[in-house]
């Protein structure tokens, strides 16, 4: 990046301070009044001094501005946290609540229930409605047959959303917290009923009706459930009807962004809109109308698809481009544009900083803006058709430059064939997206819609075949890649030094990159050395299952259920502890490991206790255990009583109360997460 780019991009200078403040405020939730006062003083004093002193102290004024931006960023998490609202549902008690709710999404079928997100309206106490704030995830025992906007009355206990606590597992609680959701509730058919009216505002009803009409049109005219699911994801980001195998193929080939609404889709719509509005005269009123129409379409589409971070980033960027191109006829700095979009989104919702989609979206665009031209200049093809292919390849490679470390850290895998997959999927999905927009335009004429829908459906089928073939090639995915947060930061330092070295052409930057690569290798090697000395006993938190794992060095084994959920949990533990794999040991009810002994009880105790009590460290009670806690001391001498995730809730409550009365040490895996004992 050249120096003039820094000068014409003021948001690029302010963004790091806002982001640093927001991150600090997340861990230190306080409003720094004293620091803000000092920053305001630094900004206000220099203009009151003489010209010479004002010029000498201009750095102080800049320090005041950047310090104030940092303080504002530090305030954002506290101000935007719904938990500070006195009407938040978490302040209304942990007992059963009588809640009036508005459904905000269509219920989705899960393994044993139906899940839907709801918005709280009020809570009833003493036959009086008290206004309440917050969102809650509602789990229905049966198909509720309700739609977004429906008002419900439910009588249930709002439970805090907790993680399973398994090592290396997905942090679902943090994901929900970023969306402002902290509670969930389970209701049977008798615990809820529908209320009259619609809880959506008029704009919300318009958006929902447009979204529902789009889905109905695609399902009607695109042949095949699997193809229609791809069409829904491609156009409006609706993923409930996607086939699991298709999603796996798109993920393994690195083109999952095609079926996850991103800036690519909004960019295509913007370019298509510019082309369609060329007939407008290039006068002031024509440019004004063109800009307003483009901006309206961009934001309508953004809201229609759920307003994800990547879509909002593109909406802000293309809004600035449209305003600069058609309203004030000025060139917009791409760096300032990108930084302004990030600045505004963080200011509006600081939790975006922890969102993987937000990070990947901005890093991909930054990589394209910084690295595309140098990569494209490496080779200049002689034929125009080959030049177009090379342009697309350069864009794909540039987007990977800054997103690679984040992808390795979050997703723990690398799609080997991402480049050929993108060369196929990006232009192919572009034609499909325009085809779907054409289908929506002609949806009023059945004969035209049927032909367009048929073409879109078979186009999707062809793309799925090619992507599936690439995903099935040998070595298509490098999985279980382990990289820590510190290693990710060092890897970014390596990439930044290489980029700077390529831009300025000085060897000292290359030497710096080499030193950082050595440091990264040392950190990675130390991780493996440390893993070789570990020894752990783990009771996994797998719903309705019993699973005990042992880790010694970089090897592991386990006993209990070998279900799919258990296998996935063990994969997370393999990654987290740098283990080569876990082997299954069948037909075993006890574990002796690292000087500790654990016994799994899943039945009845003998009628008569032994003459000599059995000494054991841990007693694990599972779902089939029919045991009186008060009699355990007649059979065992133990240190800790463990209840695993297979124990029914009613029995778990009885056992916990008994332990409390008898002052026994116990550990509830469903309540406290997986038990990890370092030996």
Image (cartoon, rainbow, N blue to C red):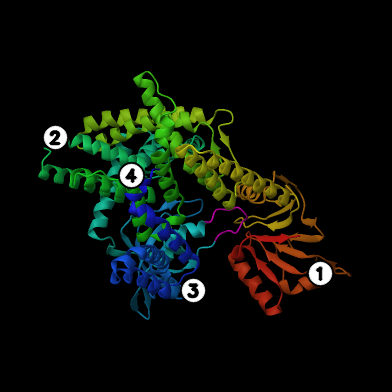
Image quadrant in which the C terminus is located: bottom right
x, y percent for residue 270: 27, 40
**Proximity of marks 3 and 2: CB atoms separated by less than 8 Å:** no
Secondary structure at badge 2 equals loop
- Disc 3 packing (10 Å; few <14; some 14–19; many ≥20): few
Q: What element carries label 4?
A: helix
**Is there a contact, CB below 8 Å, between mark 4 and mark 1?**
no
Q: Nearer the viewer, mark 2 or mark 4?
A: 4
Q: Are marks 4 and 3 in contact (CB under 8 Å)?
A: no
Q: Is residue 518 magenta?
A: no
For the view shown, which residue lies furthest in the front direction? Answer: 52
From the viewer's perspective, is residue 467 above or below residue 316? above
User: Residue 563: where, in percent of width, then height?
Assistant: 63, 47
Q: How crowded is mark 2: few (under 14 residues within 10 Å), some or many (20 or more)?
A: few
* Quarter location, residue 87: bottom left
Tell me which label, 2 or 4, sits earlier in the chain: 2
Pointer 1 residue: 635
Q: How crowded is mark 4: few (under 14 residues within 10 Å), some or many (20 or more)?
A: some
Task: Give SS at disc 1.
Answer: loop
Cα–Cα span, label 4 and label 3: 50 Å
* Residue at the spot 48% in from the left edge and 37% down from the top edge: 505
Q: Tag on residue 334?
A: 4
Circle 3 sits in a helix, a strand or a loop, which is it?
loop
Highlighted range, magenta: 163-171
* Residue highlighted by disc 3: 94
Between label 4 and label 1, give the one nearer the viewer: 4
């Amino acid at each position: 990046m050249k120096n003039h780019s820094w000068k014409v991009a003021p948001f690029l200078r302010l963004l790091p301070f806002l982001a640093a403040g927001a991150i600090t405020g997340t861990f230190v939730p306080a409003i720094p009044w004293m620091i803000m006062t000092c920053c305001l003083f630094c900004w206000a004093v220099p203009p009151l001094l003489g010209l010479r002193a004002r010029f000498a102290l201009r750095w102080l004024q800049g320090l005041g501005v950047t310090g104030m931006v940092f303080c504002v960023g530090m305030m954002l998490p506290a101000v935007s946290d719904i938990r500070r609202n006195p009407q938040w549902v978490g302040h209304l008690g942990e007992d059963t609540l009588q809640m009036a709710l508005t459904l905000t999404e269509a219920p989705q079928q899960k393994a044993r229930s139906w899940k839907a997100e709801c918005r709280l309206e009020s809570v009833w106490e003493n036959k009086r409605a008290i206004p309440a704030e917050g969102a809650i995830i509602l789990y229905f025992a049966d198909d509720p047959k309700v739609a977004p906007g429906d008002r419900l009355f439910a009588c249930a206990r709002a439970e805090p959303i907790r993680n399973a606590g398994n090592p290396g597992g997905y942090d679902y609680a943090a994901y929900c917290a970023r969306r402002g959701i902290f509670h969930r509730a389970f209701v049977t058919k008798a615990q809820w009923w529908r209320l009259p009216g619609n809880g959506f505002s008029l704009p919300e009803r318009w958006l929902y009706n447009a979204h529902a009409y789009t889905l109905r049109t695609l399902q009607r005219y695109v042949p095949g459930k699997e193809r229609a699911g791809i069409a829904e994801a491609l156009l409006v980001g609706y993923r409930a009807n996607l086939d699991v195998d298709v999603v796996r193929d798109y993920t393994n080939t690195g083109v999952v962004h095609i079926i996850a609404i991103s800036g690519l889709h909004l960019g295509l719509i913007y370019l298509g809109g510019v082309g369609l509005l060329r007939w407008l005269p290039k006068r002031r009123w024509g440019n004004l109308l063109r800009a307003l129409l483009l901006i309206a379409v961009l934001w309508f589409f953004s809201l229609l698809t759920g307003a994800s971070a990547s879509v909002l980033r593109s909406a802000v960027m293309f809004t600035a481009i449209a305003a600069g191109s058609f309203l004030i006829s000025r060139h917009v700095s791409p760096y300032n544009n990108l930084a302004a979009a990030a600045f505004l989104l963080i200011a509006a919702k600081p939790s975006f900083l922890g969102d993987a989609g937000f990070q990947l979206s901005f890093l991909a665009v930054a990589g394209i803006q910084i690295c595309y031209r140098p990569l494209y200049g490496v080779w200049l093809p002689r034929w125009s058709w080959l030049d177009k292919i090379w342009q697309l390849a350069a864009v794909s490679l540039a987007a990977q430059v800054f997103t690679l470390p984040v992808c390795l850290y979050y997703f723990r895998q690398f799609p080997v064939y991402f480049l050929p997959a993108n060369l196929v999927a990006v232009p192919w999905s572009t034609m499909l997206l325009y085809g779907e927009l054409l289908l929506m335009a002609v949806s009023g004429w059945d004969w035209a819609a049927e032909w367009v829908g048929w073409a879109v459906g078979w186009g999707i089928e062809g793309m799925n075949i090619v992507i599936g073939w690439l995903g099935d090639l040998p070595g298509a995915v490098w999985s279980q890649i382990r990289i820590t947060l510190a290693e990710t930061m060092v890897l970014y330092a390596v990439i930044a030094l290489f980029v700077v070295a390529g831009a300025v052409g000085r060897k000292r930057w290359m030497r710096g990159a080499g030193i950082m690569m050595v440091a990264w290798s040392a950190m990675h090697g130390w991780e493996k050395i440390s893993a070789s000395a570990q020894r752990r006993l783990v009771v996994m938190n797998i719903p309705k299952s019993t699973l005990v794992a042992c880790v010694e060095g970089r090897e592991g084994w386990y006993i209990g259920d070998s279900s799919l959920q258990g296998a996935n949990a063990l994969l997370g533990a393999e990654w987290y502890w740098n283990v080569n794999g876990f082997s299954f040991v069948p037909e075993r009810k006890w574990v002796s490991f690292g000087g500790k002994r654990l016994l799994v009880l899943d039945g009845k105790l003998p009628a008569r206790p032994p003459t000599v009590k059995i000494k054991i460290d841990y007693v694990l009670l599972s779902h089939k255990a029919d045991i009186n806690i008060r009699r355990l001391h007649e059979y065992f001498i133990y240190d800790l009583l463990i209840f695993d995730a297979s124990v029914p809730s009613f029995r778990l409550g009885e056992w916990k109360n008994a332990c409390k009365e008898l002052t026994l040490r116990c550990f509830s895996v469903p309540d406290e997460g997986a038990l990890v004992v370092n030996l």
